[in-house]
Amino acid sequence: MVSEQLSRVVITGIGASTPLGNSFDEIGDALQAGRSGIDWYDAGTFNRLQKHAAANVKEALIPTEKDSLVPTEQFEKSSRIEQFMIGPAAHALTDAGINPKANSLEQRKRIGIIAGIGAEQLKDWERDFLDSGHDVFEASRQPSLVHRVAQMLGVNGPATTVAAACASSGYALALGKTWLTTGLVDACVVGGCDVLSPTALAAFHNLRALSRRDDDPKKASRPFDQNRDGFVMGEGGVFFVLERQHAAKARQCKIYGELAGIGMSSDASHMVTPCSDPVQASRAITEALADANLPPAQVDYINAHAAGTPVGDAAEAGAIRDAFGAAASEIPVSSTKSMSGHLISAAAVFEALACLVAIKRNMIPPTINLDNPDKECCLRHVPHQAISSPVHVAASNSFGFGGSNLCLILKSAA
Amino acid sequence: MSSSADLSALCLVESYATASVHSSEVNALARKKHSHGCHSLPPRFLRHADEQTIIGMHSIIRALAVDTQDSRDMSNDAVIAATCLAGQPSAARTMIGLRDKGPVAVTPHIVPQCSLHSVASAASVGFGMHGPNFGVGGGPHAPAEGFLLALTLAPMLARTSPSTRIWLVCTGWDQQPSLDTNGSLTNDPVCRGMTFVLKPEVALPIDNTLPHIQISSLKNASSPDILPAHGRLKELCEQFETGIHTTVAITDTCTIEISSLSSIRPSSRSNKAVCQKEAA
């Protein structure tokens, strides 16, 4: 059995570069105010439509002198996806009070890093191709982004990239927890990043997965609304530092919350379309609650995956009702994608961050644009405006192409 | 920070198989019926699949063929797919289409079929596996990262779902495809797949004569006998075929130990005929 000392894992550092801001407080303020980070976006020469609604990051988080892990010059030379990893990962380590470069080599080997990135090579090849490069024709075996960033940061423990489509960064958190509970590392940098790109916008558009509303970009992302017509793509990067609770308490560092439970399952139904039978998505939620040793009624807030697609939102509502039973009608549910857009690979970790905001502020962020809740999505919604409510435990769902289901349970540190 | 804790992650190897095919033969392989016993992929399931997905599914079928269990229930199993630079030919053709004809030419299959999760998801959907499915690696370190994640996921699965097996599928090119500016291949590289069927174990120690993989700590993992984490899949497969114990470095002090797999090599198994048929 995993000992109590090994099994409790907490979040001690956060770094973020998102359409809603680049700090925990800034993002918290946006979520609390119901402010949208979505706007018209110019995808350049290869625009699919005259106007694309998208949530882009205006200014990437730059590692400060205080972060001191990556020289600004090196950061500025990096690609956008690299910046969405370097800045947040460096800041998360600083926030946790860990400077790998000041640690001994032995200590640095006990810090791991897991990045949730769904299509890193595709993005690299595309960037190079649009810059008249030939990498996609003659691909080289260069180390993945996570290995390059680990070296930059002085993180010498195990490093890996994981992908479960839109649940990728949630899997990074879940697997980071297993690295800590199995004793592989003493601290783990976990999260995900993604960038808006012409190919991704065109591919999701051609899949008919994106919203085609062309009136007001801020109204395009409409999770659970009966007039929803697809999701709005976003970009950004969010990274956490995970540590075992007893070690974090011994260091007397700030603790944002506990990653108390993880649940994972697969629909095994279709490569793209979510399964209309909620049984496997529901199983992921149930397993996460069991892992956290909590009954459904103890959950104070559910951050839904709900991206605004007609099939996905209804399927998730069914899974929530199935997993939470009678408690489903009492627990407030919202989708922060209505404000942030869908950060794809980074979505799950961003939404875990939203849960930590909810816990810290005892506030439920709203689902904006939820004017007419769909009868198929019958839940206790929080439309338009945030509400004050005690939040000790939050559940965050993430579902991805290929039928990946993930649920994370986050608890207050107290 | 606290000192190192002993890691007790371990899996028994219940089946193991490799597969390889030249790029020019991939389409023919995709059209083949992929089945063994009660398991089969739906017809035309691989019609939009990437080369590494096709070879990955083929290596799963081969692993089923040498399996100790005649009618394995895969419904609760997890699948981890470690791929290296997958999707390159499709990406090249997609980008040429984007440049020449605009976004309308971008195939919607590029996201579900050419991303890091694609091989794992295809295995989950194709074989009906309801455990976790995810991709790992993406670059040269992929096989080593796949072993590491299988082993670190194992204790949780062993505790919560003892009947669950982990299917670790590793894929990659012996030599990366080379394409001209029209997106046509100018070489005919070998695409390779390798599948392990792993049974997570909680209790240690185990009978060392059973094929197994485990994580171990070393003071110095830079010995010449230890394979580097970024080694090619071909070299790893060749090492396994020799039937000797293999060590793969994860970090300077952490390695994956893979015991001899000779007892599960097709030539030593009773269902030799099946394997010979498969090979034919």
Image: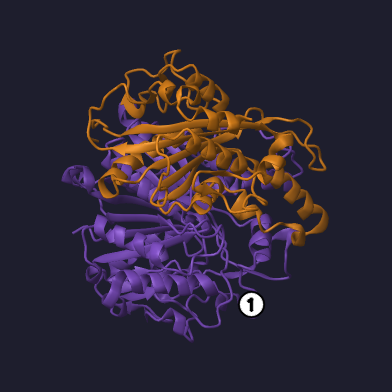
Chain colours: A purple, B orange
Q: Position of residue A377 (x, y in %)?
A: 44, 79
In the rendered structure, the answer to whether residue B199 lies left or right of residue B203 reads right
Q: Secondary structure at mark 1?
A: loop
Q: Amino acid at mark 1?
A: Arg
Residue nearest the viewer, comparing A186 with B18? B18
Which of the two residues, A13 or A412, is positioned nearer the viewer here? A412
Residue A311 placement, left or right of A140: left
| Residue that appears at 52% across and 56% down | A402
State the residue at coordinates (66%, 43%): B32
Across and down, in percent, residue B146 comes to 45, 36
Is residue B239 visible in this depiction of the protein?
Answer: yes
Q: Position of residue A264 (x, y in %)?
A: 38, 54
Q: Which quarter of the figure has residue B235?
A: top right
| Residue at mark 1 | A213
Subunit of mark 1? Answer: A
The image shows residue B59 at horizontal and vertical percentages of: 55, 36
Q: Is residue B211 above or below residue B160?
A: above
Specify the farthest residue to the bottom: A372
| Relative depth, front residue between B207 and A260 | B207
Dot 1 crowding, Cα within 10 Å, few <14, some 14–19, many 20+: some
For the residue pair A108 and B95, the one nearer the viewer reads as B95
Q: Quadrant of the C terminus of chain B?
A: top right
Query: In the picture provided, is B165 more to the left or to the right than A209?
Result: left
Q: Can residue A62 be seen in the rendering of this structure? A: no
* Residue at the spot 29% in from the left edge and 41% down from the top edge: B155
Residue B48 in the image: above or below residue B23: below
